[in-house]
Image (tube, rainbow, N blue to C red):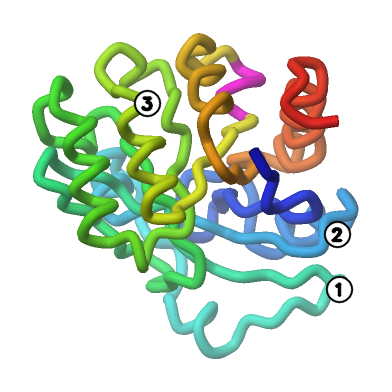
Amino acid sequence: MRIINPYSDMHSHTFTYSDGLNSVDEMVIMAGRTGIRKFAITDHSISHLRQHDIEKKTSASCVRFRWKNIHNDVKVIFGVEADLISENGRVDFLNYSKTRDFVILSAHRHVYQGDPEKITEGYIKALERHHEEIDCIGHLCANYFGKEVNVERVVDAANHFNVPVELNCANLAFGKTNMEKLNQMLGMVDRIYVNSDSHTLYDMMYLRIEGLKFLREKGYVE
């Protein structure tokens, strides 16, 4: 197992376009304070935002044509936490910032509309159809689909299509991870991202540290 991003954090959310508590600029400033070199803002898909009554706060053109990092030397990219919608592999890739420089494929309660018992097929079909667009599979071992998802089959497909999976440090730190399936995932995956899934400045400062500590203590990395 290889960690792809030892000096970057590729999963975060802002108040500007999603359900985070802080603005794009506040998150970028904190990214600089943590010492990371690259940072991805991956606000939720429109399906997710509509399900949770989260409205757009500003125009997408601000990010696409006008925003620049004036705070530090961190490379900032804008992407999307895309949502798996159904067991036939349908995915919502669109978010309010209309950016897809980094795509995380995740499944969320109340946004996934298919049969939970068939969510494994949904992941696999999404990978078959969209693996060239997907950069990472997010929080595969989250508790809310912990009973239904077959981690072995999904990771096998991800390895086949050369798509990394994520150690989601927020879920790990806040007790929202199926630990049995997480250890199964870590034991067979080729490559992982260690991401904070930050929704607050505190998350960005501390959660990746906790995730990397977990990997060392369990013997997955030195």
Query: Pointer 2: what residue?
Result: 32
10 horizontally vs 146: left or right: right
Query: Pointer 1: what residue?
Result: 73
Q: Quadrant of residue 59?
A: bottom left
The span from disc 2 to disc 3 (Cα, nearest Å) is: 36 Å
* Amino acid type shown at disc 2: Gly
Magenta-drawn segment: 170-174
Question: The residue tagged with tag 2: helix, strand or loop?
Answer: helix
Horizontal and vertical percent position of residue 46: 29, 56
Circle 1 crowding by C-alpha within 10 Å: few under 14, some 14–19, many from 20: some
Q: Is residue 141 above or below residue 5?
A: above
Of the pair 214 and 106, the residue shown nearer to us: 214
Q: Give the dominant element type of the magenta stretch: helix, strand or loop.
A: helix
* Amino acid type shown at disc 1: Asp
Q: Is residue 74 above or below residue 171?
A: below
Circle 3 crowding by C-alpha within 10 Å: few under 14, some 14–19, many from 20: some
Q: Is residue 109 above or below residue 100?
A: above
Horizontal and vertical percent position of residue 10: 62, 54
The span from disc 1 to disc 3 (Cα, nearest Å) is: 39 Å
Q: Residue at the bottom extreme?
A: 65
Which disc, if any, is residue 152?
A: 3
Q: Residue at x 45, y 83 (%)?
A: 61
Question: The residue tagged with tag 3: helix, strand or loop?
Answer: helix
Q: Residue at x 81, y 39 (%)?
A: 205
Horizontal and vertical percent position of residue 1: 64, 38
Q: Are marks 2 and 1 in contact (CB under 8 Å)?
A: yes
118 horizontally vs 25: left or right: left
* Amino acid type shown at disc 3: Glu
Q: Is residue 199 visible?
A: no
User: Which of the two labelled residues, at mark 1 and mark 3, occupies the earlier sequence position?
Assistant: 1
